[in-house]
């Protein structure tokens, strides 16, 4: 009998396959249809976004999955929404849901680590009920804000600034599902490159220090790494690979210092951060869907270089 192949370090391609797995697609699609926004998300979104419809305030949702957050924002009245995700199956589900709800949202198929500054120049089309999709890969996907709704009365061409997003969201830990810190930093830089100065970035991560039990488990993990006994699929300390009802999942769990350093290095100025439990008591349904996390708000630095 052949020996089973040795486990390999996780790759972005593997993670994308995990999110395209039918179990993950069902999980995130069900949440988009039935769960909507968490109480803590509502609180933080209210803090960083102007009141709806905010038609001249283009909002970008990275890692939009099956559309849970963007479609809910549309339901609250927001009218300038763009979402993208690198898992094609999830983008398809987001498009279906937006169409079903009559939500005019531009959804793209794109990788947060490969948005490319060029995409701003070339531009993309409009948000028509989530039908639009661009492709990730070598060529830069063309992510830019959808046109204003209702259309601006001005007939002049939009100023370059209007090609930048006014806010960016990366909800439910999507950024931490990018393997390797240098790639997460690349994604943060790419997102800064498509946002206007001062734009808020709202995202969540786990937190290795959020409870005594969590801290103890990471002390044990540190001993495993020091003894050369770590899971060979993991790339960096803080990584976790586990299997649950939505299949294989990769997650990087940072500590607070790591995220502060990553923001500072990538064109973002830290504004605030809070553990979820400090913000709201979530329903049982939300707690079954997601565990404790930290909400982060950063602002796009004023002098961030356009090309990164
Ligand atoms: C935990 S899911 C959250 C989905 C959705 N935001 C929600 O809250 O239901 C994380 C999402 O991030 C996406 N993602 C991970 N890495 C990505 C990348 N490099 N580019 C774009 N999307 C990515 C995954 O495909 C997945 O849809």
Image (tube, rainbow, N blue to C red):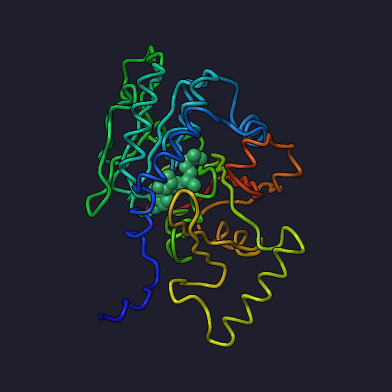
Relative side of 166 to 206, left or right? left
Residue at image location 32% in from the left, 59% down from the top: 13
Residue lying at 46% horizontally and 38% vertically, measured from the top left: 61
Q: Position of residue 171 (x, y in %)?
A: 53, 42
Asked if 222 appears above or below 37 in the picture, the reply is below
Residue found at x 71% / y 62%: 209
Q: Is residue 293 left or right of residue 169?
A: right
Q: Is residue 179 left or right of residue 137?
A: right
Residue lying furthest bottom: 227
The reply to whether residue 80 is in sight is yes
Residue 191 visible in the current orientation: no
The C terminus lies in which quarter of the figure? bottom left
Q: Residue furthest left?
A: 139
- Quadrant (top left, top right, bottom left, bottom right) of the N terminus: bottom left
Name the spot of residue 96 as percent of width and height, x first: 34, 26
As drawn, 136 above or below 281: below
Q: Quadrant of residue 2?
A: bottom left
Residue 57 percent coordinates (x, y): 49, 27
Residue ID at (50%, 44%)? 170
In this image, 72 relative to 97: left or right?
A: right
Front residue (pair 2, 277): 2
């Amino acid at each position: 009998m052949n020996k089973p192949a040795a486990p390999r370090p996780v790759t972005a391609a593997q993670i994308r396959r995990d999110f395209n797995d039918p179990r993950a697609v069902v999980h995130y699609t069900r949440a988009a249809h039935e769960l909507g926004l968490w109480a803590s998300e509502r609180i933080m979104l209210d803090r960083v976004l102007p009141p709806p419809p905010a038609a001249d305030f283009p909002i970008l949702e990275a890692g939009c999955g099956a559309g849970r957050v963007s479609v809910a924002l549309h339901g609250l009245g927001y009218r300038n929404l763009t979402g993208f995700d690198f898992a094609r199956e999830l983008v398809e589900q987001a498009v279906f849901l937006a169409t079903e709800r009559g939500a005019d949202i531009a959804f793209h198929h794109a990788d947060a680590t490969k948005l490319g500054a060029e995409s701003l120049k070339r531009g993309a089309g409009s948000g028509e009920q989530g039908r639009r999709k661009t492709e990730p890969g070598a060529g830069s996907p063309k992510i830019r804000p959808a046109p204003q709704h209702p259309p601006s009365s001005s007939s002049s061409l939009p100023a370059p600034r209007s090609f930048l997003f006014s806010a960016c969201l990366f909800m439910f830990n999507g950024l931490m599902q990018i393997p390797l810190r240098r790639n997460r930093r690349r994604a943060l830089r790419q997102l800064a490159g498509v946002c206007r100065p001062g734009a808020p970035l709202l995202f969540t991560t786990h937190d290795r220090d959020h409870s005594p039990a969590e801290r103890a488990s990471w002390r044990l993990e540190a001993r495993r790494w020091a003894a050369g006994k770590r899971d060979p699929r993991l790339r960096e300390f803080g990584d976790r690979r586990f299997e649950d009802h939505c299949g294989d999942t990769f997650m990087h769990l940072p500590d607070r210092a790591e995220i502060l350093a990553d923001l500072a290095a990538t064109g973002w100025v830290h504004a605030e951060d809070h553990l979820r439990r400090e913000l709201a008591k979530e329903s049982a349904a939300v707690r079954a869907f997601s565990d404790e996390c930290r909400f982060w708000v950063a602002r796009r630095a004023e002098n961030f270089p356009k090309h990164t």
